[in-house]
Amino acid sequence: MRARVYLDYNATTPLRPEARAAMIAAMDIHGNPSSVHAEGRAARALVERARAQVAAALGAEGAEIVFTSGATEAAALALAGRGLTGAAIEHDAVRAWVDQSLAVDAQGRVTVPDPARATLQLANSETGVVQEFPEGLAVSDLTQGFGKLPFAFNWLGVEMGFVSAHKLGGPKGVGALVMRRGTDLAAQLRGGGQEMGRRAGTENLTGIAGFGAAAEAAAKDLAEGVWNSVSEIRNILEEALDAGAKKTILVGKGAARLPNTLCLATPGWKAETQVMQMDLAGFAISAGSACSSGKMRASGVLEAMGYAPQLAASAIRVSLGPETREEDVLRFAEAWLKEYRRFESRAA
């Protein structure tokens, strides 16, 4: 039996060996990072090392890094009560806190008239479309771009951003808010004075250690051109599908995109059907964002880009990673095109 092929890296990534090793080592450090004795200081040193690793990977030296339970919590910390504007293509964790009035064009690009009162994602998890950043942006979801795109928080011109460990080979359940030093921010979780008073609660030492190690390894991959190779493999897949599926739309093809992401929409072919067919064939893909795909609803991102609801309901996402091989995507193309031809014959 052929091994399964994982093509859902934008949902979550395999744990990096570096992160696993760091987490196992952290489990032997039993002090509380807030304690002043030797055991506590050892735990604190681990947290601060990870903070420096994440800051370096983000290009955020000198900025403040606040560890959270994930990007969702970090988004709430950055956005709650601020009355910012955003676009309907943002992740649900952002849309919950903003006025979704920013205009989106057919390529998924957003117009931001007042950056100081707005939030804008760096890259979209469903389409892979990368945004052009206006100077003076208030908040950005950096989650999908972190580790895949060369950028530095310090030159993005944004006040605050947030990221998640499990999108770049770290553990689930830990993320971070990054902000320019001196930014005024009220804590949402109150109690102890952890995380410089920004976020109360004993730090997730094991998760934070894994996050730091994963961020450092991801930065090394990026510097060594690993994602250029991923982009080449994605393009091979895109060309194979484009040649064999004439009714299928390659969403965002004309825009700058993440190097690993391919979004396909085939009129009348429901996304959940495709996901199940590919799962049975041995391939893990998704229908939109992992946080909403379980609901199997039409993609709100594609609807915001002007796609009709029926077409938006057909959109699937294929997202690759450093472990993806050319033979993997060619096998996927063969399996998907086989089902596409069956769909086309039934629809005729």
Image (cartoon, helix red, strand yellow):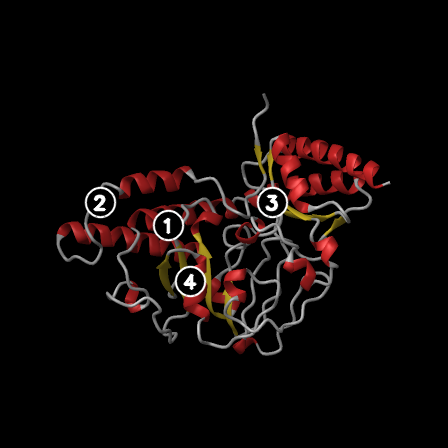
Residue nearest the observer in this picture, 14 or 267: 267
Residue 16 as seen in the image, left or right of residue 280 = left
The earlier-in-sequence mark between 3 and 1 is 1
- Marks 2 and 1 close (CB-CB < 8 Å): no
- Residue 331, percent across and down? 67, 30
Residue tagged 4? 74
User: Considering only order in the chain, which callout, 4 or 1, is on the residue closer to the N terminus?
Assistant: 4
Q: Earlier in the sequence, mark 4 or mark 3?
A: 4
Task: Kindly report the distance in space between the C-alpha atoms of the residues bearing marks 2 and 4.
Answer: 26 Å
Q: Which quadrant holds residue 107?
A: bottom right
Describe residue 41's horizontal placement relative to residue 111 as left or right: left
Q: Amino acid at mark 4?
A: Ala
The x and y percentages for residue 156 are: 52, 66
Other-residue count near label 2 (Cα within 10 Å), few / some / many at <14 / 14–19 / ≥20: some
Q: Residue shown at 41%/70% (left/top)?
A: 180
- Please state which of residues 54 and 297 is positioned toward the viewer in this rendering: 297
User: For the residues carrying marks 2 and 3, which lies nearer the camera in this image?
Assistant: 3
Residues under numbered marks 1 and 4 in contact, where contact means CB atoms less than 8 Å apart: no
In the picture, the quarter occupied by the N terminus is: top right
How far is mark 1 from mark 4, CA to CA? 17 Å
**Circle 1 Cα neighbour tier, 10 Å, few/some/many (<14 / 14–19 / ≥20):** many
User: Which residue corresponds to the image point at 30% horizontal and 52% vertical from the top-left?
Assistant: 204
What percent of the width, then of the height, locates residue 13? Answer: 49, 43
Judging by the rendered image, the residue that carries numbered circle 2 is: 29
Q: On the image, numbered disc 1 is attached to which residue?
A: 212
158 displayed left or right of 106: left
Among numbered discs 2 and 4, the one appearing first in the sequence: 2
Whether tag 2 and tag 3 are in contact, CB under 8 A, the answer is no
Does residue 317 sit above or below 192 in this rendering? above
**Which residue is label 3 attached to?**
286
Could you tell me how far apart the alpha carbons at marks 3 and 1 are, in whole angstroms?
28 Å
